[in-house]
């Protein structure tokens, strides 16, 4: 009886295992054919915004920078859109702005804005603000808008000056590195001196300044491209040696203008009036404005952040450099196309104009500067 019972149990267990393996085989077989005939493929879903993405592709291409049409998306438009976005989502505006300033990739910034726009489609107030941006397609108006607000920068001579000063970048930078005076400040002094000479009615301009795009070198009352007068040059030299002077800069600068010959008068003249090398013109100008700055700093009236005052004092001379609370902007009157400007105002407007920024950017400070 017992043996018969055990046989039945083993028989049922065997049939059970056989059934299980048969079922597994059937499932695997079905799975095989399902995969083979793509019956298991997930059909997925179509994004609700697929049409939006399609419109972007049709408008701007397939994503490659090559051939992308961003003619209607200028940097001005980007900055405007970011200003609008910052009212609603300042964090996203910051991320886009930061990415653009680091990459300078307008196409990427444009796409970042489109990603945001995807979530702002129903925000009527946002789109109303965005659509207030005006694109001016009037050629005459566009030409007018391409001019500078600083009228004297719209003259042909100014374009010649920019080409000329670019040739002297290495010399200006060298003078700046030796003195710790910001290159852009040195150029501001140069602008004030040169712009009055860059006059198309002058014979010098017609003969070589305009055609050759070179700076004007003065050789009479003022010397060189920065217009240093002989008495001023002598004062600069003396101040470098005289430790009791209010203009004294310290031992570090004491030997910058040492002469190599006994005929200092001729050597000074040759330094400042060289047509081939304007280095000393920039060096004297930088030391002059640095000495004046130190004087005012010691007197408790710092002017290091005021290029209009520094340039005014550079123009009118040491004897007029009297530290006080409210110094006046001025200097020589400069007539440009019938309009009168002051030396200090010209230097100030150039300094903050953004012109020539790629060559002479702003530093942390105008004196003893360090790059950011």
Image (cartoon, rainbow, N blue to C red):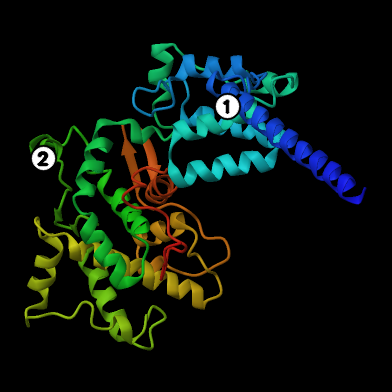
Residue 104 versus residue 186 in the image, above or below = above
Residue displayed at 19% across by 66% down: 280
Residue 46 versus residue 108 in the image, above or below = above
Q: Disc 1 marks which residue? A: 32
- Residue 71: where, in percent of width, then height? 41, 21
Q: Disc 2 marks which residue? A: 212
Residue displayed at 7% across by 71% down: 266
Q: Earlier in the sequence, mark 2 or mark 1?
A: 1
Residue 226 versus residue 179 in the image, above or below = above
Disc 1 element: helix
* Residue 198 disc label: none
Residue 265: quarter of image = bottom left
Residue 51 in sight here: yes
* Farthest residue, direction front: 1
Residue 246 versus residue 219 in the image, above or below = below
Residue displayed at 41% across by 67% down: 369
- Residue 165: where, in percent of width, then height? 23, 48
Q: Is residue 146 left or right of residue 287?
A: right
């Amino acid at each position: 009886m017992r043996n018969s019972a055990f046989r039945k149990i083993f028989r049922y267990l065997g049939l059970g295992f056989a059934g299980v393996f048969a079922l597994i085989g059937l499932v695997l077989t079905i799975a095989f054919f399902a995969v083979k005939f793509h019956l298991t493929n997930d059909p997925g879903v179509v994004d609700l915004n697929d049409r939006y993405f399609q419109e972007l592709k049709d408008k701007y291409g397939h994503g490659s920078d090559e051939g992308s049409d961003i003619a209607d998306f200028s940097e001005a438009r980007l900055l405007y859109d970011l200003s609008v976005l910052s009212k609603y989502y300042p964090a996203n505006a910051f991320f886009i702005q930061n990415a653009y300033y680091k990459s300078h990739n307008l196409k990427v910034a444009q796409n970042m804005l489109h990603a945001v726009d995807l979530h702002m489609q129903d925000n009527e107030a946002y789109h109303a603000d965005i659509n207030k941006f005006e694109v001016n397609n009037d050629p005459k108006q566009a030409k007018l808008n391409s001019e500078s607000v600083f009228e004297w920068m719209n003259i042909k001579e100014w374009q010649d000056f920019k080409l000329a000063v670019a040739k002297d970048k290495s010399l200006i930078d060298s003078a700046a590195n030796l003195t710790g005076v910001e290159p852009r400040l040195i150029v501001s002094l140069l602008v004030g001196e040169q712009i009055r000479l860059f006059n198309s009615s002058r014979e010098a301009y017609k003969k070589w300044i305009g055609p050759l795009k070179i700076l004007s070198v003065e050789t009479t009352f003022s010397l060189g491209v920065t217009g240093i007068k002989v008495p001023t040059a002598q004062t600069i030299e003396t101040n470098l040696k005289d430790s009791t002077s209010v203009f004294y800069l310290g031992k570090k600068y004491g030997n910058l203008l040492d002469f190599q010959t006994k005929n200092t008068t001729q050597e000074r003249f040759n330094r400042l009036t060289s047509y081939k090398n304007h280095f000393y013109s920039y060096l004297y100008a930088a030391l002059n404005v640095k000495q004046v700055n130190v004087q005012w700093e010691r007197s408790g009236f710092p002017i290091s952040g005021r290029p209009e005052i520094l340039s005014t004092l550079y123009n009118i001379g040491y004897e007029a450099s009297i530290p006080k609370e409210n110094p006046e902007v001025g200097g020589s009157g400069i007539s440009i196309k019938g309009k009168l400007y002051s030396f200090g105002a010209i230097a100030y407007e150039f300094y903050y104009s953004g012109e020539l920024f790629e060559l002479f950017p702003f530093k942390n400070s105008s004196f003893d500067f360090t790059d950011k």
